[in-house]
Image (cartoon, rainbow, N blue to C red):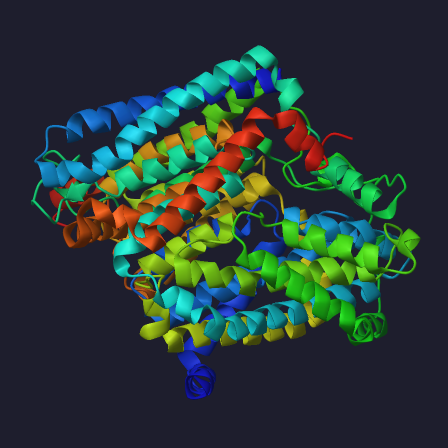
Amino acid sequence: MIDTMFSSLFAMLSSPHIMGLMLIGVFLGLIVGVTPGIGGRLSIALAIPFVFGMDMVGGAVFLLTMHAVNGTSGQISSIMFGVPGDGDDAATVLDGYPMAKKGEAGRALGASITASGVGGIIGAIVFAIMIPIIEPVVLAFSPAEFFLLALLGITFIAFISGRGNIFKGIIVGFYGMILATVGMDPQTGTARFAGDYLFLWDGLSLVTAVLALFAVPEMIALGVKGGSIAAVSLEGTRYSYRQLLEGVMEVPRHWWLVVRTSIIGAVIGMIPGLGSSAASWFCYGHAVQSSKTPERFGKGAVEGVIAPETGSNSREGGSLLPTLFFGIPGSSGFAVLMGAFLILGIQPGPKMITEQLPLVWTLIWALVVGNLIAVIFLLFICRWVAMLTFINGALLVPFIVVLVAVGSYINEGRWENLLILVGLSAIGYGLLRAGWPRAPFVIGLVLGVIAEKSLHTALALWGLEFFLRPLSLVLIGLIVATIGFAIYKTLRPSKALEESGAVP
Amino acid sequence: MKSSLVKYSNSVMTVVMLAIFVVLVGLASGYPPGARFMPLVVGIPAIVLCLLQLALDARERRRGAAEISDTRSELEKAGEKVSRMVGRRVDFRISHEFMPGVGPEISPQEMVRRELVLWGYFLGFIAGIIVFGFWAAIPVFLVAFLRFQAKAGWLFSLGLGIGASVLMSFVFERLFRVVLHTGFVTDYVLGLFGG
């Protein structure tokens, strides 16, 4: 294990190709993080066509670093202008923006950027420590259990993204799974749902489907919303590099809080179903509760900036564990990332330990090195990166639509994919408009083919007794428990809302 | 008004999904046993779930969406959470327009109008690609969108639209060596001139 660990690091650092891709990934991730209207999921969806056909390691490192550093730059606008990049950064606004208004923007930025980077690194370390612990559990799964794992993945992601209604998420997941059956059936040679259209015989293009479900609806929604953030005070943007350095030093000064919140964030990331912003809010709450002077929070306490940033970024390392080893993404962002990994040929499951351990270590090191690069980069350029917040969303829409059309075409070189793009985009926009989750679709679509193969294998090996195997029973129990809890929440909404703090 | 629109679109979406699954299950039932197995394993439970969802939609409508859905903004929820943690009322005074996903209220009619316009641009662009090819459709789409939808000036729209098209052409055709669709009409016209 130690050999693999260090040989992966050496191979990564000595490869100009991988390091170059990582630098591009970090740069794009930081830009996307601060640009309004482009979230982590959308950026991954847009990048998929360009990594299609790329080597597995390079593509995965590029996508992971791009996704991992997204939150690091999102906080800049939270602190300087009180404009969070996404839900994860909202907790940083609470103390970061008051600090900026008090003339301490540099200190807040230095502390948050460093905390974010350190959190990302500790999250990766926690993931690495968990590998030998989780190994026996992962190896207990046979490829035949993948059908139930796929159902569990859909159930979890439906629970996360369903906003209190798990059925919608599962329906969307099943929609993805049934679309995965389009094309030539490997068992019988029947062209399913393809008719005489030859371009459908190879199945639906994954890239086109992901772009249609995520990118096009988001762009139309952004175009409908229109406008940009215009009227914010720029007083928070003035700071010196000395202030920034003072902020950096706040992180070692609060090292124990950093370690605690990083571990909390990583553990939250490992538990699918807790949602993407849970880590930052939980860590913020922990900082308030463990402080001797909680009354300072909300008025510009530096711990209120450090805690959510470490928690939010360490979650990335934690989320990688269920994504890679069980095929269950820890958040909706990781659902799209997992879809991209599958397109690259990375199949989550026991093989990640038995055959792909060097790749796992490369990804862990990519998180560590990517976060370090992002921190160094941002400490120098955050003042200018922040200005991207003011880009008019309407100006971005046509360029992203062009990239979507090109991306949909180039991976198979078929113009018919553009027609599929239009059809699936209409469904995707309908889902977005009606508030239905879209992340389960990706899981269903990408795992559908593997799940079908696994189901056939399992039934051939064990017949219907497959469902009575101990591991199968555990997975079925988890699925039933998740659905049961979600139904309970749906049928008892008032109580559930009260518990979650929605009803005062 | 907004919540009733969401409720309405919710049921429409459930019916659309139900229709999709019914059609796909219907088609799959005509396939040989091995080929229809997975579509039926997935499709039949999905139909049951869609019917359940329709019942939930009806129940939600009866109870009134306002009672059961949490319509507060992320900022208000955050204020509530932190107030509980610190044991006193905390009011984060950040304008709602700065919060992600929260914008000024748009009337349903205006929203539908904007949606139709944007879908028009999108469909026009895709049709343009298929008929005239990428390198004719991209600059036209970019300039038209920037000028008429994003309300940018002519000079800015032309400069950015044409500049970006040239850059993309260089990146894809020269750097990545990707040959993009040239368009059926463009091919036909070039064919007439022996191109």
Residue A290 placed where, x, y %?
83, 60
Which residue occupies the foreground of this view, A18 or A118?
Answer: A118
Task: Tally the marks.
Answer: 0
Left or right placement of residue A30 versus residue A50 in this view: right
Residue situated furthest top in the rendering: B62
Q: Is residue B150 above or below residue A108?
A: above
- Give how far across and how far down residue A71 sits, in percent: 62, 58
Residue B97's place in the image compared with A304, above or below, is above
Residue displayed at 29% across by 26% down: B20
Res. A265 visible in picture: yes
For residue A347, above or below residue A164: below
Closer to the camera in the image, B157 or A325: A325
Query: The N terminus of chain B appears in which quarter of the rendering?
Result: top right
Task: Identify the residue shown where x is 43% and y is 53%.
Answer: A328
In this view of the protein, which residue sits in the foreground, A33 or A299? Answer: A299
- Between A266 and B97, which is closer to the camera in this rendering? A266
Mark yes or no: residue A158 visible.
no
Q: Position of residue A45 (x, y in %)?
A: 43, 51
The image quadrant of residue A491 is top right
| Location of residue B2 with respect to A343 vertically, above or below | above
Residue at point 49%, 44% (across, down): B158
The x, y position of residue B44, in whole percent, is: 27, 29
Is A180 placed left or right of B27 in the picture? right
